[in-house]
Amino acid sequence: MSDSDHLYILWTNADPVTAEKMVFMYAANALKFEWWKQVTIIIWGSTATLTAENASVQSHVKQMLGSGVEFSACKACADELGVTDALQELGIEVIYWGEPLTKLLRERSPLLTV
């Protein structure tokens, strides 16, 4: 699979409606209808707290993980917000994203920011 088949969604908007009606809806349908072969949602900033504390968001995350959508969270943000353990318990990878994001941008990988 080439990088052009892998969509990254940089999710920074902590509005629950935006999460459900844009980020989650598009990511799930992108795999279901094979618009992309791989989808990774990058949790960054206040979305880490939303994910760690909102039961509805957690339900969506678990469902999407089961359908193949990948989640990864910014470790610096998660640590500073005190939600690293909660995210990991949901099955979300937690890593430092500064360098990988820079690489994605430099390589012009498909990146949707919300």
Image (cartoon, rainbow, N blue to C red):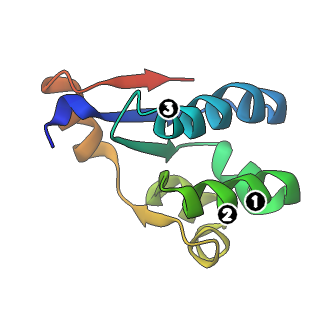
* Quarter residue 25 falls in: top right
- Dot placed on the residue nearer the N-terminal end, 2 or 3: 3
In this rendered view, identify the residue nearer to me: 81 or 14: 14
Which element carries disc 2, helix, strand or loop? helix
Q: Amino acid at mark 1?
A: Gln
Which marked residue is nearer to the observer: mark 3 or mark 1? Answer: 3
Query: Residue 70, image x and y in percent?
Result: 46, 54
Circle number at residue 62: 2
Q: Amino acid at mark 3?
A: Phe
Which residue lies most toward the front here?
33
Which element carries disc 1, helix, strand or loop? helix
Circle number at residue 33: 3
Query: Residue 41, image x and y in percent?
Result: 49, 43
Which element carries disc 3, helix, strand or loop? loop
Q: Residues within 10 Å of mark 1 (few under 14, many from 20)?
A: some
Residue plotted at (35% across, 57% down): 96
Please name the residue that numbered disc 1 is placed on.
58
**Is residue 54 toward the left or the right of residue 3 in the image?**
right
Residue plotted at (53% across, 39% down): 32
